[in-house]
Image (cartoon, rainbow, N blue to C red):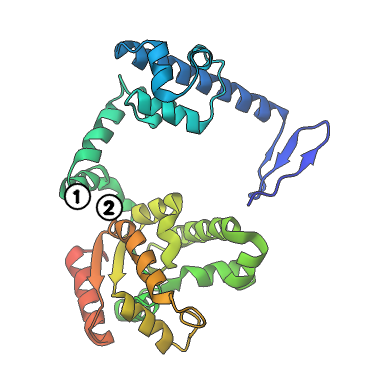
Amino acid sequence: MHYITLEVGMAEITTFSGKVTGPDTVKSAEEAAAELLSQVGQRVRRVRERKGIPRRVLSELSGVSPRYLAQLESGAGNISIGLLKRVADALDHRIEWLVGEEDPWNSDVQRIAELYRSADRETRKAVTRLLSYEAEGSLRASRICLIGLRGAGKSTLGRRVGDDLGIPFLELNREIEDHAGMPVSEIMALYGQEGYRKLETDALDRVVATHDKVVLAVAGGIVAEPGTYGKLLSRFHTIWLKATPEEHMDRVRAQGDERPMAGNPEAMAQLKSILQSREVLYERAEAMLDTSHVSEDVALRRLLTLIEERGFIE
């Protein structure tokens, strides 16, 4: 949700974040768009010629008219994403290679990205650790973040870990509420998901700026926000607290919250679907602890051991 204000004759735009853009910014944005169209046209023509595909054949393969393809290659065709995807597929070419800043024929970044994309999981982890050496050392400091779905034990175990290690324990949602002066439910009602996510990343920045040693618990959905989650991974030692869907549901209900099941016979199926869709994101954490079928005390001991063995706290 963007809040936009237009001043007649001034072309002034104010976004949700409070940023104001004037005529010069609008003009530069138009110039950038024109440069992008020119780049896309050049790359389409280059790959077509390198593969020896006549424009007429590309038209037949993509369903885009020869005339429009000619306009596109000249930089004058304001093509839609859908049509560009059809052109890219007909050329057996990734669409991001046509629109990205990196030239796919001359870029080391692109070559490394392709190698990374085709590598197995362990190789990817090794490469990530190598490239993130500085972040793992200095940027993360002694900050720990517990991630996972609601009911994984983030707040319960996080608070006890903080007490045991003598460092602060924070809940990001509580930090958001304290700063906004209202509960998360009201924030969502007033500002929507985008408003909440902006407050979330601002709160994360404040925690990083004010704490070198901290245990932080975050909402389960933060992993779905690439920018915020990337910041979390680089500035915290992240631990995924994993549990079975049944345990997640039972723990939430044990807290006295019947909302997950109230009037929703498909709640368990939905929970399993959410967990399955987020697993690949949770797996990006530095470490994982399965809290299924163990007592709180056992889970705490295992978590403290993991933190000590991995050297997360200096």
Quarter of the view holding residue 296 = bottom left
Location of the C terminus by quadrant is: bottom left
- Expressed as whole percent of the image width and height from the top left, the position of residue 205 reads 48, 56
Q: Which mark is residue 121?
A: 1
Quarter of the view holding residue 188 = bottom right
Query: As shown in the figure, which amino acid type bears the numbered disc 2?
Result: Glu
- Expressed as whole percent of the image width and height from the top left, the position of residue 53 reads 34, 13
Q: Nearer the viewer, residue 9 or 254?
A: 254
| Image point (30%, 66%), residue name | 240
150 versus 140 height, above or below: below
| Image point (19%, 49%), residue name | 121
Does 35 sit left or right of 219 as displayed? right
- Expressed as whole percent of the image width and height from the top left, the position of residue 23 reads 72, 28
- Expressed as whole percent of the image width and height from the top left, the position of residue 67 reads 53, 13
Q: Which residue is mark 2?
A: 136
| Image point (19%, 64%), residue name | 310
Q: Give the Cα distance between marks 1 and 2.
A: 19 Å
The kind of secondary structure element at disc 2 is helix
